[in-house]
Amino acid sequence: MEEKMKKPEEYRIVLEGGQGEIEEKKSRFICNVRAVHTEEEAASFIEEMKKKYWDARHNCSAFVLGSRQELTRCSDDGEPSGTAGRPMLEVLLGEELCDVAVVVTRYFGGTLLGTGGLVRAYTQAVKAGLSESKTGWMRLGREIKIQTDYNGIGKIQYLLGKEEIAIQNADYGADVMLKIVVPEAKMQQLKKQLIEVTNGQVKMEELQHIYFVDKDKKCL
């Protein structure tokens, strides 16, 4: 049986889409960026932009789906083949972005740009749109359930705060039950630290793998 593809440790996403604009020889290029998770969402976004900019000459598009950029699509929307959609897609791939769609709207300024000029313009338009967007990283982690008594909870909370690991939920009963998500690369080290700070008065259960948002990529 073929082994399933291992999940990536991290992948880059758009947290908040933006809009950027450039001008080239009086042609306006407006780029809108949006996070999408399915082909249907991408198609809906592209159609939305076409309706919004119904009077424009072209609404070219590109999108990337999947944590390994597995699915890509692009459209020149009437521009010469390979001068718009593909350069736009290359920017997304080069920026290592996943689950994102971009639409670049062109209002023709009356001067032909040539194939090289179009490639540069659509490339720069996407870069302008991304510069006005917020990006982050989805990091692969593991949910861990922690059980301890009330004597150890303060030390655990201090340790988690120091390591910048958020408590997902807490249940204060006879014992304290915490659920956290730990970056995969930090898990073994953290488990060892938890045992040390509580003098072994802690129980830990590894749960499912899960991705979590990291707004600022940090070395682990």
Image: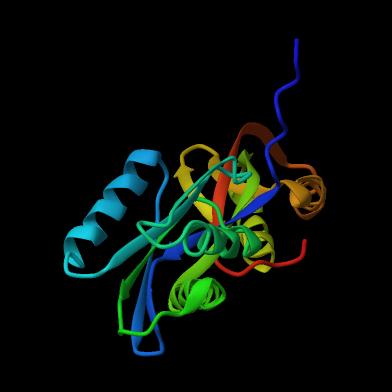
Residue 31 appears left or right of 219: left
Point 77% across, 55% down: residue: 197
**Residue 39 drawn above or below residue 98:** above
Q: Is residue 201 above or below residue 47?
A: above
Residue 86 visible at all: yes
Image coordinates of residue 145 in percent, x first then y, are 60, 38
- Is 61 left or right of 55, judged from the image as shown? right
For residue 73, above or below residue 16: above
Of 198 and 31, nearer the camera is: 31
Between residue 84 and residue 150, name the one nearer to us.
84
Viewer-proximal residue among 9 and 209: 9
x and y, in percent, of residue 124 in the image: 52, 78
Could you tell me which quadrant the C terminus lies in? bottom right
Residue furthest top as drawn? 1
Q: Can you give x and y, in whole percent of width and height, for residue 134 in the image?
A: 47, 71
**For this rendering, which residue is in front, 200 or 216?**
216
Q: Is residue 107 left or right of residue 173?
A: left
The residue sitting at 55% across, 63% down in the picture is 87
Residue 140 x, y percent position in the rendering: 65, 46
Viewer can see residue 198: no
